[in-house]
Image (cartoon, rainbow, N blue to C red):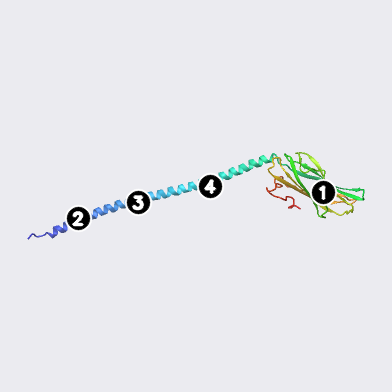
Amino acid sequence: MIGIDWTAVGAIATVGLALVTTVLAGATFWLGKKTRQVATETAKLARTTDEEMQLLRDQTQALKEGAGTSAEQLTELRESRFAEFMPMLRWQTPNAYLQEQSGPAWRLGLVVLLTNEGPGPARLRDVRISSDTREPFEAVGIGIPSTLPPGERINFNVVRRTSVLERRRRVITIAIRYGDLLGEFDYETVTRIAVTFEDPGMGADFVDSDERSALERRLPKGRADPARDRR
């Protein structure tokens, strides 16, 4: 019977276990190294992704700002083009008069200077006259439609014929809608004038001479009734 040297077997087993432990330790070290490498690459990738996302956001914002700047420049260019043809009507020096006519009848009148101070002609499209007494005053001596060239001044005449003379104070409102040469926009000017037909003491004074700029007078496109807001 062959005897087993258990001491030798134990020594061999110990050596084998040591080798396995060494191999496992090496494998663990290698795996740890690879894990650190993966973690490092992942961090780099994350940083790269964040940088790329930030770059994309910056580029998007720059495009938005560029588009906004381009739109503003286009608007400024368009407005400067229209400014070369923009009319500007100015009211000045109102005067009242009273004429006795046959019948018996009376003619109540108001004359106010109207000047086109803009660089472009004013294409007069509509005139509206009203008074706080609801009397039917009307504009005379002006054609609608007609054109008032730049720098030209006219006497805008408003009259009412009546057989009953009432000398009380009245506020007469004159509204004119006009367009530019290009036909792109309509504008309105509205003036309110207090008139007294007393004799003596006859006179006329502005309640509102409409000192708005040409751009402030521009009407929204499609507006049907331009003269009501300032009455």
**Residue depth check, mark 3 versus mark 4: number of the one nearer the observer:** 4
Q: How crowded is mark 4: few (under 14 residues within 10 Å), some or many (20 or more)?
A: few
Task: Return the residue nearer the eye: 137 or 47.
Answer: 137
Secondary structure beneath dot 3 equals: helix
Which callout, 4 or 1, points at the residue further toward the start of the chain? 4
Residue carrying label 2? 16
Q: Residue at the spot x=36%, y=50% of the render?
A: 38
**Residue depth check, mark 4 versus mark 1: number of the one nearer the observer:** 1
The amino acid beneath tag 3 is: Arg
Distance between the Cα atoms at labels 4 and 1? 58 Å
Q: How crowded is mark 1: few (under 14 residues within 10 Å), some or many (20 or more)?
A: some
Q: Residue at the spot x=14%, y=59% of the render?
A: 7
Distance between the Cα atoms at labels 4 and 2? 66 Å
Distance between the Cα atoms at labels 3 and 2? 30 Å
The amino acid beneath tag 2 is: Gly
Secondary structure beneath dot 4 equals: helix
**Residue depth check, mark 1 versus mark 2: number of the one nearer the observer:** 1
Q: In this view, does 58 lie to the left or right of 133?
A: left
Secondary structure beneath dot 2 equals: helix
Q: Are marks 1 and 3 in contact (CB under 8 Å)?
A: no
Residue carrying label 3? 36
Q: Do the residues labelled 4 and 2 touch (CB within 8 Å)?
A: no
Question: Which of the numbered marks, if any, corresponds to residue 138?
Answer: 1
Task: Pick the quarter of the image with the N terminus.
Answer: bottom left
Task: Return the residue nearer the eye: 11 or 133.
Answer: 133
The amino acid beneath tag 1 is: Glu
Residue carrying label 4? 61
Which residue occupies the extreme left position in the image? 1
| Whole-percent x, y for residue 117 in the image | 75, 41
Task: Return the residue nearer the eye: 36 or 117.
Answer: 117
